[in-house]
């Protein structure tokens, strides 16, 4: 995809913001006996990979760490190979410990013969860190160490809140292949016991929920853990009454690369009942929208899939319906990985992106629909093409509908794990704001 100099400059600005947040943490770190009501992570979109990247501080002495955000995964993992992890405060998780039992990996490191290091420890609980972008997993030690995150986001990053013994997995350098440049691992936002949401809630004793606001490549976003107002400039405050809610479903069969018998999926599934284009129901095989006894089918949310991925017959039905509703708009040859593309110069513009038909994900009832507008359904491609941003996932995928990152951008999503529900705002552009305008502090 072609990128203008303005886009490159904007990407540099978002990167600079993340680096500013990381560097400023040290200067403003403060210890307090009072637990924070919320903590935050800054987010930027990597232009080269379309991955969403965050940063935090870890280890002793405190070191800035960059990681790719993942709505799946079992825990935070970082590269511990060949001296890449240096800290005086790390500790192993013993094989017989309660933490190891809760991790449910069934693995224990007992045969390391090298000098002790985070990646080489005996009588240490084993984990299986996975790069969910490349679908490569390996074995690695589970250890704990200091992890610090800010308590405010804008207008300035605020004092740090520190988890003194945050559990994570040691990955290998090869596991970082395919991740955004500079990323040392992946930060899991899943429902797993040792993913960030549950560990941070247990450490700081706030609600087990988080809000995710993904940015476009030209701006910044945020993850908010705990209890905080969702405030955006100029004067937009979102609350429970301004969000729509749908149940978070549990897939009873693990979708991880490595899992044990009886393990459930840590990913977030929602109950899509139908899909509409321009208000009209798309005819499709509705049984594909349900999760069967083998854990196949259904709809999940993903931050590692850059675009929404649809099972082949659903993809054809949706693209055919969209094409029928846009018959008067000049088409251009398809630009991979998309199948339906238009002459972008012939498509009008609105507050919520290109002037194209809406796509709706109908959830538990007609009144609860996630309405997707042009900014989230269309992707600017090379040669001035504007393409419907859905990808053919094949005839027999594990999950029928994967709602990818582009469709989630500039939408506020609240994952309430205590109530097992997802709150969503639809496009913030309707409210004349974006994730870049989030304020906490």
Image (tube, grey):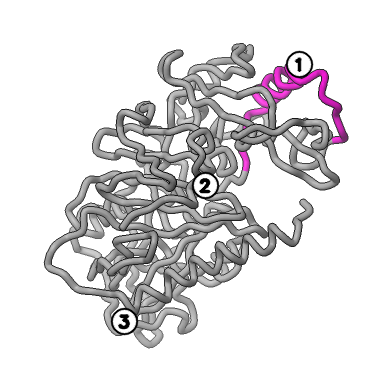
Q: Position of residue 338 (x, y in %)?
A: 75, 37
Picture disc at residue 45: none
Which element is circle 2 on?
Answer: loop
Magenta segment: does it hold 217?
no
From the viewer's perspective, is 96 left or right of 2?
left
Query: Along the line of sight, which residue is nearer the eye, 42 or 68?
Result: 42
Q: Earlier in the sequence, mark 2 or mark 1?
A: 2
Which element is circle 3 on?
Answer: loop
The residue shown at (29%, 77%) is: 90
Residue topped by disc 3: 60
Q: Earlier in the sequence, mark 2 or mark 3?
A: 3
Residue topped by disc 1: 324
The residue shown at (29%, 84%) is: 88
Question: From which residue to which does the magenta span run?
Answer: 307-333
Q: Is residue 317 above or below residue 138?
A: above
Picture disc at residue 303: 2
Q: Position of residue 165 (x, y in %)?
A: 24, 68
Q: CA distance from mark 1 to mark 3?
A: 59 Å
The residue shown at (55%, 22%) is: 360
Q: Position of residue 434 (x, y in %)?
A: 50, 45
Q: Is residue 327 above or below residue 181?
A: above
């Amino acid at each position: 995809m072609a990128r203008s100099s303005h886009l490159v400059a904007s990407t540099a600005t978002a990167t600079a913001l993340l680096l500013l947040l990381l560097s400023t943490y040290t200067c403003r770190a403060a210890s307090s006996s009072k637990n924070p009501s919320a903590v935050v992570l800054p987010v930027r979109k990597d232009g080269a990979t379309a991955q969403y990247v965050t940063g935090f501080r870890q280890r002793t002495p405190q070191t800035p760490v960059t990681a790719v955000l993942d709505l799946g995964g079992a825990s935070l993992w970082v590269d511990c190979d060949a001296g890449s992890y240096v800290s005086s405060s790390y500790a192993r998780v013993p094989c017989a410990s309660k933490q190891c039992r809760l991790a449910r990996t069934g693995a224990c490191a007992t045969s390391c013969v090298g000098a002790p290091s985070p990646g080489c420890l005996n009588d240490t609980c084993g984990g299986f860190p996975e790069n969910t972008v490349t679908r490569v997993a390996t074995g690695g030690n589970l250890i704990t160490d200091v992890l610090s995150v800010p308590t405010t986001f804008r207008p300035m990053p605020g004092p740090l809140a520190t988890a003194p013994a945050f559990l994570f997995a040691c990955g290998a350098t090869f596991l970082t292949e395919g991740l955004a440049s500079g990323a040392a691992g992946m930060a899991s936002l899943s429902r797993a016991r040792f993913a960030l949401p549950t560990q941070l809630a247990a450490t700081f004793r706030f609600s087990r929920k988080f809000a995710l606001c993904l940015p476009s490549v030209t701006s910044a976003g945020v993850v908010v853990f705990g209890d905080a107002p969702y405030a955006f400039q100029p004067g937009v405050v979102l609350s429970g009454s301004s969000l729509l809610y749908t149940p978070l479903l549990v897939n009873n069969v693990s979708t991880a690369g490595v899992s044990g018998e009886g393990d459930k999926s840590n990913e977030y599934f929602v109950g899509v009942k139908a899909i509409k284009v321009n208000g009209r129901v798309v005819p499709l095989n509705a049984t594909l929208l349900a999760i069967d006894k083998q854990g196949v089918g259904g709809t999940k949310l993903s931050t590692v899939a850059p675009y929404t991925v649809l099972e082949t017959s659903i993809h054809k039905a949706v693209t055919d319906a969209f094409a029928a509703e846009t018959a008067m708009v000049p088409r251009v040859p398809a630009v991979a990985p998309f199948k339906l593309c238009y002459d972008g110069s012939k498509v009008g513009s609105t507050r919520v992106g290109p002037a194209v038909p809406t796509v709706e994900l109908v959830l538990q009832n007609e009144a609860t629909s996630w309405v997707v507008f042009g900014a989230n359904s269309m992707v600017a491609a090379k040669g001035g093409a504007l393409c419907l941003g859905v990808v053919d996932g094949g005839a027999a995928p594990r999950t029928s509908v994967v709602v990818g990152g582009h469709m989630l951008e500039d939408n506020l999503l609240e994952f309430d794990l205590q109530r097992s529900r997802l709150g969503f705002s639809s496009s913030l552009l309707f409210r004349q704001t974006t994730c870049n305008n989030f304020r906490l502090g």
